[in-house]
Amino acid sequence: MQPRSREMRILQVGLGLLLLFAAQDGHAIAVPSPQCRRQCGDVEIEYPFGIGMSCSLTAAFNISCKVQGGISKPFIGTVELLNISLTHATVRVLHRIATYCYNTSSGRMDRSGVAGLNGRDSIYRFSAIDNKFTVIGHNALAYISDRNGTGYQSGCVSTCSTLSDLTDGSCSGIGCCQTAIPRGMDYYRVSFDDRFNTSQVWTFSRCSYAVLMEAAAFNFRTMYLNTTRFNDTNAGRVPVVLDWAVRNGTKSCEVAKRNEAGTYACLSNNSVCVDSTNGPGYLCNCSQGYEGNPYLPHGCQDVNECNNSPCPSGGVCHNTIGGYQCSCRAGRKLSKQSKTCIPDAGLIIGVTIGFLVLMIFSSSGCMILQRRKLNKVKQEHFRQHGGLLLFERMKSEKGLAFTVFTEAELIQATNNYDKSRIIGKGGHGTVYKGIVKDNMHVAIKRCALIDERQKKEFGQEMLILSQINHKNIVKLVGCCLEVEVPMLVYEFIPNGTLFELIHGKNQALQISFSTLLRIAHEAAEGLNFLHSYASPPIIHGDVKTANILLDDKYMAKVSDFGASVLDPSDEEQYVTMVQGTCGYLDPEYLQTCQLTDKSDVYSFGVILLEILTGQVPLKLDGPEKRRNLSSNFLLAMKENNLDAVLASHVKGQESIELIKGIAELARQCLDMCGNNRPSMKEIADELGRLRKLSLHPWIQLNTEMESESLLDGRSTTGSEIEATTTGYPSQEGADLPMNPRSSYYAR
């Protein structure tokens, strides 16, 4: 009989699984569905492992559940899984034994079985702590090596002369030997030395065995040499322990936290990340004082240490978040020296009782006083903000559509002013989206601080604003007066602002110039109503594209009256502090601090420039001479070079008469002298006339056709859209999507 080659052919492990998962995928971590199976046979499958791709952290953690002999068993690839440990980050699987036996028929030594692990990028590594390379035989030398046999290589030799030399439970080289393996092994191969064989003495030891297996599961028996018992258990399979980790190409926790924000696996708030001690990657553990599954949101729960009675005899254990505290019963104290509860002076009992009685009376008294004080403060705020005046007017004037909300109602409507409800912030306050009674969606503005004079006028102003009913002005629904700074409640406008349509996130819609012109015309109508028809007239004070909202039909709505004032009736009211937005401020107002209706006209002229040029009113970068849009425009008009400042999509798309008409109107609005500027009524009339120029002489579209073009078939009222020859796409609903969280009201 000629011996075979010394090197045994590479034996591939049936742990095909481990190694089918060559790399974890990089998708974002998703919480498994509650419908995912968490049991296969008598084995619990804990997340991040799961039965099915959608129930595990990644494909590398997938477990298959198969039925064999009428019993459900979990498998990692083709290898049977025995159990999973999250605490120790290990799995136990059944591993096949490699054999080297004398064949009596052929008179040769035959090799059989498989051993090894395949998968350089697997999440699994052989445990160097729990496993040992074990060789059994009367005359055997087996080798264990890495992939190429050029790196790690070790061997174990087992010899014995007679069965009487063997001892049960002893694996010290006589009939059985074991050796440790290094960390980081994800693959190995086994070979037997042909010079060591049992061909001549097979009468009591025909086979030799070699396998990497769990050390704690092995107990040597002498019968393994004179029978085939060692290879009969579990069909020639023995347990082996595999260390697992979240690898995914990640070498440490630091890298995972920095580069894997969407795939970081430690989801529980009370979890910590630890680097893997066996190969690259990381593991998740619950923080000290917590237990559970750190790979699930809220998976780590507080441990009740008091269940294990950690306190001394007679002590009382108090569980705390992440720990515990020990105390002694009344009349006793904890001795630091003996760590026991010892008797205390009786004075403590009396002091404790007296203190408790005092606290009860003090707390009750404070609560009563605080409640009375709070009610008194609310009544005072209500009076200061003109609440009594409001109620008198509401009683005397039937049909006054105005609601005075309580503070509690607005707290409930905004979920206690939750940050997720914020839809706008600005110099005049913060705006929250809320839902009040009758399931009505509103915008609730918590105003910034106001002075004493404004507090006195607040009630009167609210009465005036509440009576404004114009389709192009945001309607004031009500207010809350029982707080230090009053809160305003407006109708909710969903589709953003004109600023966003021209410059911001909706800029890509590329709506037609005629539609922008319509929106400007509607805004002018709203401002004209404030100036000409409100009694007394109202000056807005902060006219800008960010304060022109767009409703669900993309109709203009003038908003944010935080800087508005009533038309002053005396010199004291006429002078106010300078406020507004840079780039829109009237130069005459900056010099005199006198806010007039012509101040709104100047700001509206800047809006016309934004529509013509597509530029913001003020640029903080670039050459200093080109930072102010108004100055650049007026210079271009003076030099008869209007084409230099026009937006590219305007040039050649509209008639020169229309463009020049709008430019001339903007120039008049931007006149340095307020008296030379047109009124808002004149502006609205002129825009109405100019809008007709944007229509082909043979095309006339009614209101319904505009609404269908803009909103994809939904009819609207009170708005028009013109046919345009600009070449831009028609105003379909897809061009103007809804924006449920627009930043408005507060700028």
Image (cartoon, helix red, strand yellow):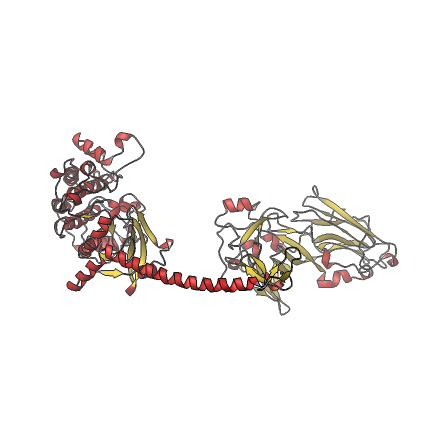
User: Is residue 115 in view from this perspective?
Assistant: yes
Between 490 and 379, the one nearer to me in the picture: 379
* Residue 388 falls in image quadrant: bottom left
Q: Is residue 644 above or below residue 222?
A: above
Left or right, residue 679 beside residue 24: left
The spot of residue 643 in percent (x, y) is 21, 34
Left or right, residue 322 beside residue 571: right
User: Is residue 397 in view from this perspective?
Assistant: no
Query: Going 27% across and 59% down the picture, which residue do you hit?
Result: 379
Between 599 and 70, the one nearer to me in the picture: 599
Query: Going 82% across and 48% down the picture, which residue do you hit?
Result: 195
Between 187 and 401, the one nearer to me in the picture: 401
The spot of residue 632 in percent (x, y) is 22, 33
* Residue 289 falls in image quadrant: bottom right
The spot of residue 13 in percent (x, y) is 66, 54
Left or right, residue 332 beside residue 520: right
Going by the picture, which residue comes out furthest to the bottom?
Answer: 70
